[in-house]
Image (tube, rainbow, N blue to C red):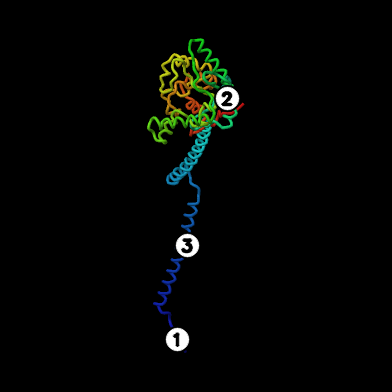
Amino acid sequence: MKKKRKPNGVKLFIISTAILFTAVFLLSGTASRKDDENNIAKESEPAVTGSGTGDVTAASSETLPDETGVSDASDTAAEGDVSDTETTAESKEPKPDPSDADNTWAMFLVNSKNQVPEEYCDGIDTDLVYESWREYYLDSRAAEYMKQMIKAAEEDGIQLVVMSAYRSVEYQQNNFDKSVQDRIDNRGMTYEEAYADTLKEVQLPGYSEHNAGVAADIMSNEETSMEDDRFKNTKAYEWLQENAADYGFILRYPENKEDITGIIYEPWHYRFVGVYYAKLLADKGVTLEEYFEEMNWVDEDGKAVYHLPVLE
């Protein structure tokens, strides 16, 4: 009969230890998972304000105001942009003529940037305003004002002399070419120099107020030379300065405005714009270019967008 062996003490110890370590490992793992779950739950909870902990309150106060501030700022900026755009657009709108303005048809801009349409030049009805060795005409709508002005001056002892008035585009071309050639022949200029210098005194065909029939070169029996500006020293010039606006005429190219008009001072060149605007511009001491800009009648390049020449 065989005897049963008694369990080995060493083996029992090893087995017991292994079981113990396994139990501890499993318990610690379970506890760790519970901590992780608790942490996740806390992070997902909404921030507490007021009675919450200091850290939570600080975190919420640093986040929410920033987000709100950005939103408000962008909204304000957007509203400001719209407002500024509307204000700019509104300020650039052409201003209308006052109800008491006369002859508004004549209030258009002619210069190196604003050409008189060919059909306008060809379609003008003209009337005789002055006669000497030749006849001088203006747009029939302005002619009567010129005749009245000449008559009024005569009654005051001033003999006005019309030197030039309406010119066809062809005549203007010939006038321009002669001026260029004169500078080449008599002033020793190259063609390029003569051309550029002529532009200071004579507009290109289609860019002259004479082509539009609303301008006249007026001098007197005291002085008829255009070689310089000495006409400004005559009684006739003084009379025109005081009375021309009453008949709807302005001194178109005044002194010290050359950089604005693009033309040298011409004390003899008078332009019809109607009585209302003639008096207004004279009182303000501004040129047509300056007034058109003030009224938003030109774009940023000086091109007229309002008060364009139109035949009636």
N-term mark: 1 or 2 = 1
Residue at mark 2: 105
Q: Secondary structure at mark 1?
A: loop
The residue mark sitting in front, 2 or 3, is 2
- Residue 74, visible in the rendered structure: yes
Q: Which residue is mark 3?
A: 30
Q: x%, y% of residue 210?
A: 52, 26
Q: In terms of depth relative to the viewer, which is nearer, 27 or 285?
A: 285
Specify few, some or many for label 2: CA neighbours under 10 Å numbering under 14, 14-19, or 20 or more: some
Which-is-in-front pick, marks 1 and 2?
2
Image point 48% across, 19% down: which residue? Answer: 218
CB-based contact (under 8 Å), mark 1 and mark 2:
no
| Residue in front for this viewpoint, 189 or 235 | 189
> On the rendered structure, is 247 left or right of 260?
right
Q: Outermost residue toward the left? A: 188
Q: Residue furthest right?
A: 312
Q: Where is residue 97 drawn, in percent x and y?
A: 56, 24
Q: Which residue is mark 1?
A: 3
